[in-house]
Amino acid sequence: MVTESSPNSTASNSAASTESDANAPSRGPGRSLLVGLSCLVIGIGLGWILRGKQSPSSVATPPTVVGSKPTASGETSDGQTNIASSDVPMEDVLKLAEESLQHLIDNVDGYTTRMIKHEQDRNGVLQEPSEMFMKIRTRHVGGEPGQGLRAYLRFETPESAKGREVIWIEDQNDGQLLVREAGIIGSMMTAKLDPTNFLAMRGQRYPITELGLTNLVRKLIERGSRDINNPDVRVTRTEGHDFDGKSLTLLQIQRSKPTDQPDDFSLAEVVIDEEQKLIVSFRSFGWPESEGETPPLIESYEYHDLVINPALTDLDFDPTNPDYTFPE
């Protein structure tokens, strides 16, 4: 791991020393500095490693239940207002996703959001839910694809990661992450990590290179295209789904039997803001071990409090931003 900055102070020699001290070989300030930096790097590395494979602090949210039997008041048995659902072809889902992707490319240069993530890591271990504030400058500013993605993340939960800040600029810093880790040791330096380094990927399902709304929609289109002619897939569309106090569209994609596809799911849920042409939530569930059990969560990504095209500048992705806590 390479550090971005070094401590400013060096060890000084004592004015009074014994004869034996005088005859001892001098380690010098350079070696002391190297030892100090090595300790910091090891400390941060251990901090990431000792976090280990996290177990969720709460049970994953179960799949959304729609079409419950309404009461006389017009509410379902779980207290929600009864809403109508209908089956739709997979082509309709792909059309909505493709329209969303084109809208993102043509009209969205950047955004801020509060993302809630809950996912299995690459080893299939469900991690703790995490919440982070994000600033994103897309790869298609001005409708011109091919630019470098920029991202700033500040973790709010879990408690073990609270205060962690990450900056990633695809075409700067040799493509490495700038990380200000949580905790006392982490706050003493800015670490540089390759996005696919084992420390950066520990507890993660995807690298930061795949972050953001555009990548999410691309993945959904890719997965949906594989199921477009699959007779074992059923798609249900539900209007009036509540998300952040707005009435949005919920799409549920159900498979009747497992497949050999990667990321195979029994149920996927997509929440779409059709007015803004934005997919704001995606969840997928695996296959229960026995009939009647709640299917296990594979991955869940929710984009709350979205602000589209805020006035982001280079300073928003600069560790010297006075609003950030990256050490100098």
Image (tube, rainbow, N blue to C red):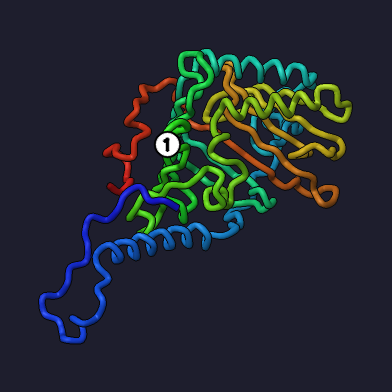
Q: Tell me which residue sits at (24%, 67%) in the image.
A: 28
Q: Secondary structure at mark 1?
A: strand
Q: Tell me which residue sits at (52%, 42%) in the image.
A: 195
Question: Does any portion of residue 164 appear in the rendered image?
Answer: no
Left or right: 299 with respect to 37? right
Tell me: residue 66, above or below residue 163: above
Estimate how packed mark 1 is, as few (under 14), some (14 to 19) or many (20 or more) residues with alpha carbons within 10 Å.
many
Left or right: 298 with respect to 227? left
Left or right: 197 with respect to 97? left
Tell me: residue 48, above or below residue 84: below
Q: Which one is nearer the viewer's eye here, 163 or 271?
A: 163
Where is residue 153 shown, x and y percent of the image?
Answer: 44, 39
Where is residue 327 shown, x and y percent of the image?
Answer: 30, 48
Q: Given the image, on which type of amino acid does mark 1 rest?
A: Tyr
Where is residue 145 shown, x and y percent of the image?
Answer: 53, 18
Q: How many marks?
A: 1
Question: Does any portion of residue 234 appear in the rendered image?
Answer: yes
Tell me: residue 211, above or below residue 88: below
Examine the image and state in which quarter residue 41 appears. bottom left
Examine the image and state in which quarter residue 118 appears. top right
Which residue is outermost to the left?
Answer: 15
Q: Which one is nearer the viewer's eye here, 285 or 15?
A: 15
Left or right: 186 with respect to 304? left
Where is residue 198 shown, x and y percent of the image?
Answer: 56, 52
Examine the image and state in which quarter residue 85 appears. top right
Q: Kindly identify which residue carries mark 1.
A: 152
Q: Tell me which residue sits at (53%, 52%) in the image.
A: 199
Q: Tell me which residue sits at (69%, 32%) in the image.
A: 269
